[in-house]
Amino acid sequence: MSQLDKIDKHQLPLHIAIIMDGNGRWAQEKGEDRLFGHYQGVESVRKIVEGCAELGIAYLTLYAFSTENWDRPETEITGLMELLAQTIRQEVSTLNDNNIKLQLIGNIEMLPEYARQALQEAIDLTHANSGLTLIIALSYSSRWELVQAVKAIAADVQAGDISPDQINQDTLRNYLTTSAFPDPELMIRTSGEYRISNFLLYQLAYAELYFTDTRWPDFGKEHLYEAILNFQQRQRRFGKTGEQIQRESATDTH
């Protein structure tokens, strides 16, 4: 039996988030430059997006470029931006063929104009699709996002649109760049790093975290299936006891 056949299609995570790590190290281990690893990483993106769409996953967020990544060598950044624009334009027809909608989160204004234009065109051309929502985190950091949300709330309080007493968890969530999407239930990080690196700090509060040593260019559908199977073996308690969850589950089945 394949890993795919073992997956319970009735207990899929609604939203999967992935930190795609290891492109540069993968390339260096093969005696190539880091950009070669990023080109190979695009193939993994295709496989994983396709795998999620085939399974019926509703939302997939890929951490493609953090605000901290702007500190990398200029040649690598330029190569990444050109690869991004080229790939997005090439993949629009595939996204439409598979009913996939593209969305972005992050400080997009920091991207070069040609990259912003390619991304906006893809968003516009896929906006009517109703299958998988593919969310690309570009020039994104969670601390940046939280600061922007606090500033926006403060401005609305100053304008009298809301009062401080009305602010709760839902208020903050509504000011985040991810307000249109449910929080991830499963977060995957490749390449053997055991941290979330300023990625969706608020949204991952109750996500199941899955770490693998596999470098991103080697990460394929079977690895995705393994992560989902691992997720399905966990008991998600949200602060409750295991006994409470079991009782609620038994009640739901009657």
Image (cartoon, rainbow, N blue to C red):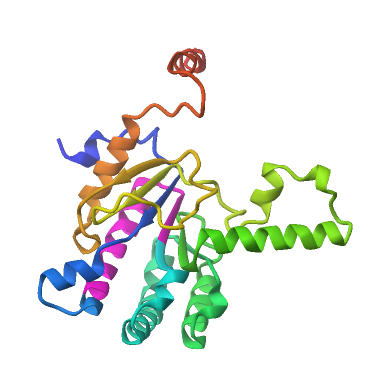
Q: Where is residue 158 in the image (x, y as percent from the top left)?
A: 85, 60
In this rendering, is residue 48 above or below 10?
A: below
Q: Nearer the viewer, residue 67 or 218?
A: 67
Lateral position of residue 160 relative to residue 218, left or right: right
Quarter residue 60 falls in? bottom left
Is residue 167 or residue 105 the one in the foreground?
Answer: 167
Q: Main secondary structure of the magenta part?
A: helix
Vertically, is 99 above or below 213? Answer: below
Position in image of residue 218 (x %, y %)? 18, 60
Q: Image point 27% across, 60% down: which residue?
A: 47
Q: Is 175 on the left or on the right of 154, as rendered?
A: left
Stretch of the chain drawn in magenta: 37-62
- In this rendering, the count of numbered labels is 0
46 in magenta = yes
Q: Residue at x 55, y 71 (%)?
A: 107
Q: Quadrant of the N terminus?
A: top left
Query: Is residue 84 toward the left or the right of residue 212 in the image?
Result: right
Name, please, the residue furthest toward the right: 160
Residue 48 belongs to the span the image colors magenta: yes
Question: Going by the picture, which residue comes out furthest to the front?
Answer: 71
Q: Which residue is drawn at 45% across and 54% down?
A: 132
Seen at 52% across and 71% down, the residue is: 123
Q: Where is residue 189 in the image (x, y as percent from the top left)?
A: 32, 52
When the figure is inspected, residue 75 is found, relative to residue 189, above or below; the finding is below
Q: Position of residue 147 (x, y in %)?
A: 63, 61
